[in-house]
C-alpha cells in the first residue's frame, strides 16, 4: 500500500498512509511544507514536526501491539497564525484528558524518557480536540506559528528561574565523574543530574533568564537542540523543582519632539525683536 495525497484547496492537505514507521518521512515532509506555507518560525516548525512524529509513532506502536495493520489519515490546514493537524485512526491510545507517565530520573540523567513527548503535547499545542466516532478517533491540534516575537511555548527570555524551596543541587562523584545530585525534601527523592540537565541546572542562579540559560547551554552543547532544552525546562516547571519570576515586557523607548517650520520661526523672531524695540523706547 502506498500513501495517497489529496489537495483540494491550496491551504489544506490530506495524507492517507498505513500506520507504519516506513511512512514517517511522508508525514513529516507534509507537515514541514504546510508549516512553511503558513509562515511558521523555525523553532515553531521544529516543534510542530516533533509533535507530528510523536503522535504518528504512537499510532504505529499501537498497530504493532494489536497486530492489526491500520491506517492513518492526516489532514493539515493553514490558519492565520499557525497550523492545524488532525490525525484520524482507530489506533489511538493517547488521551489528552489524562497525564502521560514518564520517568523524571531519565530526564535528569540522560535527557530522554519514554512518554515525555506525549506528555508535553499539552504544553505546546494551543488547543487539542479529540472526537470519537465508532472505532475511529480524530485528534486535532492547533500549533502556533511562533511569529509573535516570543520564542518557544513560554516567554523564556522574560522568565527567571530559581531552585524551589527545599530543592538542593550538590556536587557528587559518580563512576569517576563529577556530576550533581538534586535533592527534593518535599518528595524525599534524590536524582542524579547529568548531561543536558547538569549543564542547565548549574546555571540557575535566580538572576539569569531561561532564555540566557538556553543560549549558554546550546553554545556549550551544540549537539543539543533548542526544543530539547525547552522540554527540560517544562519538566522542571511541571515537577515544581523551580520557581519563576517573570520580568516585565520591555517597552518601546519613545520621545516626542515638536519643531516649528521656517515661516513660524521667522514670525516668532520678528515678534521677539519688536518686543525688544518696544522695551528700549
Image: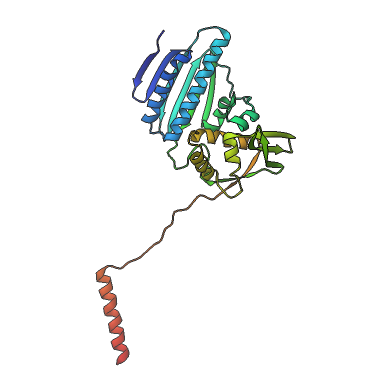
Quarter of the image for residue 42 reads top left
Q: Tell me where residue 165 sits by quadrant.
A: top right
Image-based side of 275 in relation to 178, left or right: left
Q: Does residue 134 show up?
A: no
Residue found at x 50% / y 39%: 218
Position of the N terminus by quadrant: top left
Q: Nearer the viewer, residue 240 or 128?
A: 240
The percent coordinates of residue 134 (x first, y second) are: 55, 11
User: Is the residue 168 above or below the residue 125 in the image?
Assistant: below
The percent coordinates of residue 104 (x first, y second) are 64, 30
* x and y percentages locating residue 164 in the rendered image: 67, 43
How many discs mark residues in the rendered view? 0
Q: Nearer the viewer, residue 24 or 279?
A: 24
Q: Is residue 194 left or right of residue 278?
A: right
Q: Residue at x 40, y 26 (%)?
A: 32
Residue 212 visible somewhere in the drawing: yes
- Give the quadrant of residue 187: top right
| Residue drawn at 50 percent across, 19 percent down | 56
Amino acid at each position: 500500500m502506498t500513501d495517497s495525497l489529496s489537495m483540494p484547496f491550496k491551504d489544506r492537505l490530506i495524507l492517507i498512509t498505513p500506520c507504519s514507521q516506513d511512512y514517517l518521512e511522508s508525514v513529516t515532509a507534509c507537515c514541514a511544507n504546510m508549516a512553511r506555507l503558513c509562515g511558521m518560525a523555525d523553532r515553531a516548525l521544529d516543534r510542530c514536526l516533533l509533535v507530528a512524529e510523536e503522535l504518528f509513532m504512537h499510532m504505529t506502536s499501537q498497530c504493532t501491539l494489536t497486530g492489526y495493520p491500520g491506517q492513518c489519515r492526516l489532514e493539515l490546514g493553514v490558519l492565520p497564525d499557525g497550523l492545524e493537524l488532525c490525525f484520524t485512526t482507530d489506533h489511538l491510545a493517547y488521551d489528552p484528558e489524562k497525564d502521560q507517565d514518564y520517568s523524571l530520573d531519565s530526564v535528569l540523567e540522560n535527557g530522554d524518557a519514554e512518554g515525555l513527548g506525549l506528555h508535553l503535547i499539552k504544553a505546546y499545542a494551543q488547543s487539542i480536540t479529540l472526537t470519537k466516532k465508532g472505532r475511529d478517533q480524530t485528534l486535532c491540534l492547533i500549533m502556533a506559528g511562533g511569529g509573535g516575537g516570543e520564542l518557544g511555548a513560554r516567554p523564556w527570555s522574560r522568565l527567571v528561574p530559581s531552585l524551589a524551596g527545599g530543592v538542593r543541587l550538590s556536587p557528587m562523584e559518580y563512576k569517576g565523574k563529577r556530576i550533581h545530585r538534586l535533592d527534593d525534601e518535599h518528595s524525599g527523592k534524590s536524582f542524579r543530574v547529568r548531561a543536558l540537565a547538569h549543564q542547565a541546572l548549574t546555571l540557575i542562579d535566580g538572576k539569569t533568564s531561561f532564555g540566557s540559560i538556553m543560549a549558554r547551554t546550546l553554545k556549550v552543547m551544540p549537539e543539543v537542540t533548542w526544543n530539547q532544552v525547552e522540554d527540560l525546562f517544562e519538566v522542571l516547571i511541571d515537577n515544581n523543582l523551580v520557581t519563576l519570576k517573570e520580568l516585565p515586557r520591555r517597552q518601546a523607548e519613545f520621545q516626542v519632539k515638536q519643531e516649528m517650520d521656517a515661516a513660524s520661526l521667522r514670525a516668532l523672531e520678528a515678534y521677539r525683536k519688536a518686543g525688544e524695540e518696544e522695551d528700549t523706547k
